[in-house]
Image: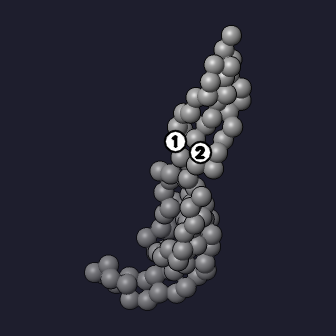
């Protein structure tokens, strides 16, 4: 008789299934989230689209998942979804886990 027990997840995100006939090791995809420390600036541009003035607004921590837009996450966090052309940001540091 063969039956599977709930998976035991290791730190490398591989699943270990215990059966009565032996042990099966299967690889599951790594789902890595990121914590991004971001500095946000409000900019003013001239007619040639060059930045002529900037002002530091704030620094924020934003979490992103694989495939997610960091631009959108920052704009949503600071509430500037309506004027993204006037906001720029620079990533200060990122932690992935």
* Res. 39 visible in picture: yes
Residue 79: x, y in percent?
61, 66
Does residue 41 lie above or below 3 as drawn?
A: below
Residue 91 horizontal side relative to residue 17, left or right: left
Does residue 88 lie above or below 77 as drawn?
A: below
The CA span between labels 1 and 2 is 7 Å
Q: Measuring 63% from the left and 19% from the top, which residue is drawn there?
A: 21
Q: Which residue is mark 1?
A: 29
Residue 60: x, y in percent?
62, 73
Disc 2: CA contacts within 10 A as few (<14), some (14-19) or many (>=20): some
Residue mark closest to the camera, 1 vs 2: 2
Residue 82: x, y in percent?
52, 64
* Res. 80 visible in picture: no
Residue 6 horizontal side relative to residue 97, left or right: right
Residue 11: x, y in percent?
63, 50
**Exactly how many numbered labels are in the figure?**
2
- Does dot 1 land on a helix, a strand or a loop? loop
- Dot 1 or dot 2: first in sequence order is 2
Q: Measuring 52% from the left and 37% from the top, which residue is drawn there?
A: 27
Does residue 11 lie above or below 80 as drawn?
A: above
**Relative depth, front residue between 81 and 16:** 16
* Quadrant the N terminus occupies: top right
Disc 1: CA contacts within 10 A as few (<14), some (14-19) or many (>=20): few
Does residue 59 lie above or below 66 as drawn?
A: below
**Relative depth, front residue between 25 and 69:** 25
Mark number for residue 18? none
* Quadrant the C terminus occupies: bottom right
Q: Measuring 58% from the left and 72% from the top, which residue is drawn there?
A: 37
Q: Which residue is mark 2?
A: 13
């Amino acid at each position: 008789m063969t039956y599977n027990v709930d998976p035991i997840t290791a730190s490398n995100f591989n699943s270990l299934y215990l059966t009565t006939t032996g042990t099966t090791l299967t690889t599951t995809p790594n789902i890595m989230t990121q914590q991004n420390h971001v500095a946000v600036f409000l900019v003013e541009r001239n007619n040639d689209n060059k930045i002529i003035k900037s002002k530091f607004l704030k620094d924020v921590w934003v979490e992103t998942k694989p495939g997610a837009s960091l631009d959108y996450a920052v704009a949503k966090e600071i509430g500037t979804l309506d004027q993204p052309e006037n906001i720029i940001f620079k990533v200060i540091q990122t932690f992935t886990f």
